[in-house]
Amino acid sequence: MIRLINICWSAGEFGLRNVNLDVPDGKYAVLMGRTGSGKSSVLEIVCGLRRADSGRVVIDNVDVSMLPPAERGIGYVPQDGALFPTMTVSEQIGFALKLRRRPLQEVNERVRQLAEQLGLIHLLERKPEALSGGERQRVSLARALAAKPRVLLLDEPLSAVDEETRDEIAGLLKRVQREFGLTALHITHSRTEARQLADMMFRIDDGVVRSEGGAAT
């Protein structure tokens, strides 16, 4: 479950105003809006990369508003994947677990498990420069899933892939969300993406979030 309660945040003349958003357990929610509407700011507040001026962020009935990102139980896929340029695919996937000082055997087992599930086994020793756009997104998704989060946040995950690959990655996202039992919040400006993925849909305009009911139509 993801719940935002009266979130306010400002930067210069732009701000989020009393944002309320509720995504029940196991649902795939899509937040739509134009470029510069505040979509990414909402996502960054949920995962802890930005601190709201007021209001609360609740994940699985726990107020995480003051917790650092690593303690919120969230997996985050940033725009364009944001892979580390000097790390192999294997190192990228295991990064969060190594930060948490998990045993090497556990890290290696989790990396291999996710690589098999996401079709990355043959890419484990490659670095980002040798990956296609779709492969980069698969790696970024695997990295986000490594620490077994309850919630998955996705910042325009299909914007950096070509049209032929887009349907493939969209299908992968939906499959992973269902198989892992995740609550997902995906931001985009594309209504086509929303139609493919959303169980429920929201729109942000001028810093205000409004529900658009159920799945996009």
Image (spheres, rainbow, N blue to C red):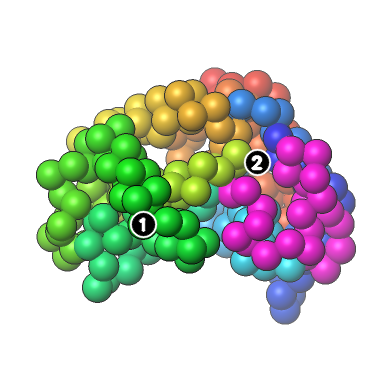
Q: Residue at x 19, y 52 (%)?
A: 124
Give x and y (percent) for residue 97: 45, 57
Q: Residue at x 40, y 25 (%)?
A: 175
Give x and y (percent) for residue 22: 75, 36
> Which residue is tagged 2?
203
113 vs 161: above or below: above
Q: Residue at x 60, y 60 (%)?
A: 70
Q: Is residue 210 left or right of residue 167?
A: right
**CA gap, disc 2 and disc 1:** 43 Å
Image quarter where the C terminus lies is top right
The label shown at residue 104 is: 1
- Could you say which is closer to the camera, residue 98 or residue 65? 98
Residues rendered magenta in the picture: 52-74
Image quarter where the N terminus lies is top right
Three-letter residue code for mark 1: Leu
Give the mark nearest the N terminus, 2 or 1: 1
